[in-house]
Image (cartoon, rainbow, N blue to C red):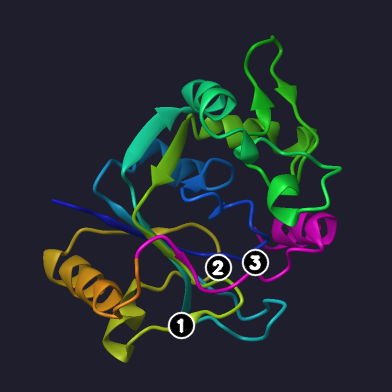
Amino acid sequence: MAYLFSYCIPIDDGAAPNPFWGVCTLVICKPAIRRVAQVGDWIVGTGSRRSPIGDVATKVVYAMCVTEKLTMQAYNAWTRQKLPEKIPDWGNADHRRRLGDSIYDFTVYPYVIRKSVHDERNRERDLGGKYALLSTHFFYFGDKPIELPEDLHKIIRAGQGHLRIHDPEVVDRFIAWIEGLNIAPNSLLGEPQCRDMEKRCLLDAEEEE
């Protein structure tokens, strides 16, 4: 049976989740979810009351069905071989390249943190998640979040942490709703809420979490 993991995204900056290049990935932040979520589970990120675009606490920022789970080491190798765009290039004019989430170079030890939205302050928490979650079946709304139906407000997790929902009626209801929007999967319907403010977003997110 699929589980639904729900959490609040304090600041949506395009790095966690990273919805670009045809694969939505959750590789940094949310270590508890990354450790336990399995292929077939759904992850939904709802907005914050204090987001840069206003109070979006009852709206969905993104939803993804996990289609692959890799160790962070395997994800680093996968991005090097198949999707280097996910490796951060901090000096690139394209914000999608700056926000790459393959930020740890596991070819050396101690592991090197590539210049990115995270730094040494985040190492322990990031690596504690152990795994990278990948999805080729996702919906990303970003700065155009979509309102949850009132009967699904029960899945919202306000503040820190996450909800792990295993009631099949609730999980099925969410899936039916998101799939019933008639939006093509892997769609980017918005941009990150603060894509041009990566450093400020990092600090703000740390304060809220």
Q: Which mark is residue 51?
A: none
- Say left or right for 167 vs 21: left
Quadrant in the picture for residue 191 = bottom right
Judged from the image, the secondary structure of the residue bearing numbered disc 2 is: loop
Task: Kindly identify which residue carries mark 2.
Answer: 159
Q: Does the magenta-highlighted stretch encompass residue 39?
A: no
Percent of width and height locating residue 177: 25, 78
Name the amino acid, label 1.
Ile
Which residue is located at x 75 percent, y 55 percent? Answer: 95
- Say left or right for 64 vs 21: left
Circle 1: is it few (<14), some (14-19), or many (20+) Cα within 10 Å?
Answer: some
Name the amino acid, label 2.
Gly
Judged from the image, the secondary structure of the residue bearing numbered disc 3 is: loop
Which residue is located at x 27 percent, y 42 percent? Answer: 39
Q: What stretch of residues is rendered in magenta?
A: 185-209
Task: Kindly identify which residue carries mark 3.
Answer: 192
Residues tagged 3 and 1 counted as in contact (Cβ below 8 A): no
